[in-house]
Each structure stands twice: as C-alpha cells, then as structure tokens.
Image (cartoon, grey):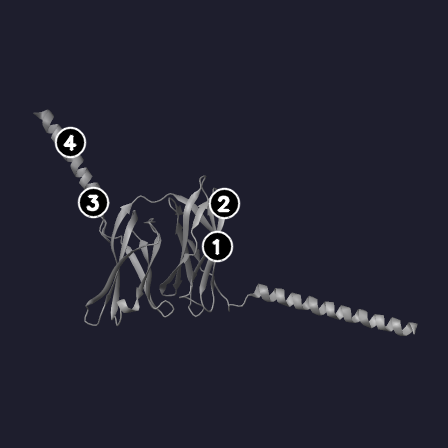
Amino acid sequence: MWKYFKIFLMFMLLFFNFIFSALLLAIPVGATPSGEHTVTINHKLYLTSEYGGIIVMGEVINNLETAISKVNVTITFYDENEQELKKVNCSTFLEIIPVGRRAAFKYFFKNEDVENFKRYDVKVSSYMASEPKPMGFSITSARTVLYPNFTRVTGIVENTISSSIKYLNIFALLYDENGFIAVTDSDLTIIELKSGATDYFVCETNLINDTFNVVKCIITGESENHSVQNEKIITSVKTEDGFNYTIAIAIIIGITLLISSLLLLKKRRKKRKKKIRRRL
C-alpha cells in the first residue's frame, strides 16, 4: 500500500511541477513574484499625407527578470463617444526581447479606418517568458544625421562568433528631450554575415528631420538565432542642410584646376606672341 502511495505522490509532484512551469511561461503583463518589474511602453502618433494615413510607432522595454517573446501590442482608436473605431494587434521588430533591452513596433492605419478619431490607446496585451538568444554580433560604429527631409542612421555591424549569422536586421530608435519619438529600420536584411566579417547598414525615416531636437539614438538588432551584444547609444547627433560637401569640394577643386590651366595656357600664348614679334 505504501508503495502505491509513494508512486501517487511522485505523480502529483510531477503534475504540479508541470503546471507551475506552464504558468511561468505565460506570465501576464506586468506581473512578477515581486510586483516591482514591468514592461514599459512608449509611443507616438504621426499624421502623414505622403502615405495617406496615420502611423503609430513606439518601443517596448523589458524591465522583467527574464527575456520575453511573442510580444503582442494592441492599438485601439476611439471616436468622441468612446466607441471603438479600429483595433489591431501588432508584433515588435525583435522576436525575443532580452532583459533590459527594447524593441520597436510600428503600424500604419488608413485615414478612412480611423476618420475623426478622438483618442487612441496603446498597450502590451500579452507576452511570454522565453530563453534569450545567444549574443553573436556587435555594432562597432554608427552615426545619426538629420537632414531637411529625413533622418539617416548608418553604421558597421560585425560578426563576433565562430559561425555565420543569417538574416540580420538593424533598427534605430530616436529620442528627444522628452523621450521616444520615432523608429527607423534597415532597408535591407543582411542575408549572411560570416565569422569575423563586417557589413554596412542604413536606417532612414522621413518622419523626422532637422527641425526635431533629437538628442539620442539607440541602435539594436537581431538575427535568426542571435542577438546584438550591446545596444549602441549615440548622443552626438549631426545636422546637415542636405548639401553634399564632398561633391562641393570636388567641384571647387575642378574649377580651380580649370582656371589654373586656362591662365597657364594664356601665359604660354603671350610668350609665343612676344617671340614672334622679336623675330619680325
């Protein structure tokens, strides 16, 4: 009898251990055993005539003690009567958000879907605890430049592990003195980056230009199986008037050489004329 009781007790312990593990993998938003750690969300809304609609973008910051995945961001628009006009769910740019890191999200709404909206709401509606991706690459250098019509973030990414990294994407988040204002993503995915190799990335957005007081840029990224070693933080943001000084310098040098050549040719012609007159 005691033997069967021990088997039953062992079975119950295994069962409750399974249930407890399953609950840990489905932690509700903002809830941890301590109650002090949460997921933070910051967002902005942009009315854009170029695309004929509204763009909502933001960042999700993982303040928990575990990495999270399957992050679901819910965006809801309401009319003046607090009636729901449009409700969508979107994912973050990163598949897995490591502890203390951030991931961006962005969603485009057509004007007719949210016409005459009074307010909108953004929240993280769900996520799951997850194992973090191993670190595999670093952002070795980067710069942020504001132009009259757009903002460009460029830099170099390097593979720091012994194997190749595949399907690598880089994202840049921009901030003013009040916090998050926009996200840019790289135009092209780096299909493969071999061990020790480097590649160039470009992130752009036409929602932010040199009229904005951008004070910080945070660059992050993710590949198919790896995460970035550290978020790259830029606090020195450059502003340019859109004029290409390299081309301008080249043009000035070209004009200077042309004028010098013409003056030299003119001097030679004068010398020839003097020689001809002497002979005569």
Q: Separation of disc 3 and disc 1 at Cα?
A: 41 Å
Sequence order check: which comes first, mark 3 or mark 4?
4
Q: Give whichever of 82, 99 is nearer the camera.
A: 82
Q: Mark 4 sits on what residue? A: 10
Q: Mark 2 sits on what residue? A: 197
The answer to whether the residues at label 2 and label 4 have Cβ atoms under 8 Å apart is no
Crowding near the residue tagged with mark 3, few <14, some 14–19, many ≥20 C-alpha atoms within 10 Å: few
Q: Mark 3 sits on what residue? A: 23
Sequence order check: which comes first, mark 3 or mark 1?
3
Q: Separation of disc 3 and disc 2 at Cα?
A: 41 Å
Q: Separation of disc 3 and disc 4 at Cα?
A: 20 Å
Give the position of the N terminus as an image quadrant. top left
- Residue 278 % position (x, y): 91, 73
Q: Amino acid at mark 3?
A: Leu
Q: Amino acid at mark 2?
A: Ala
Q: Amino acid at mark 4?
A: Met
Q: Foreground mark, 3 or 2? A: 2
Q: Is residue 31 above or below residue 265?
A: above
Give the position of the C terminus as an image quadrant. bottom right
What residue is shown at x 23% (from left), y 45% (from top)? 24
Q: Give whichever of 192, 145 is nearer the camera.
A: 192
Q: Separation of disc 1 and disc 2 at Cα?
A: 14 Å
The answer to whether the residues at label 1 and label 2 have Cβ atoms under 8 Å apart is no
Q: Foreground mark, 4 or 1? A: 1
Horizontally, residue 9 falls left or right of residue 36, namely left
- Residue 270 % position (x, y): 82, 72
Sequence order check: which comes first, mark 2 or mark 4?
4
Circle 2 — which element? loop
What is the tally of numbered marks visible in this picture? 4
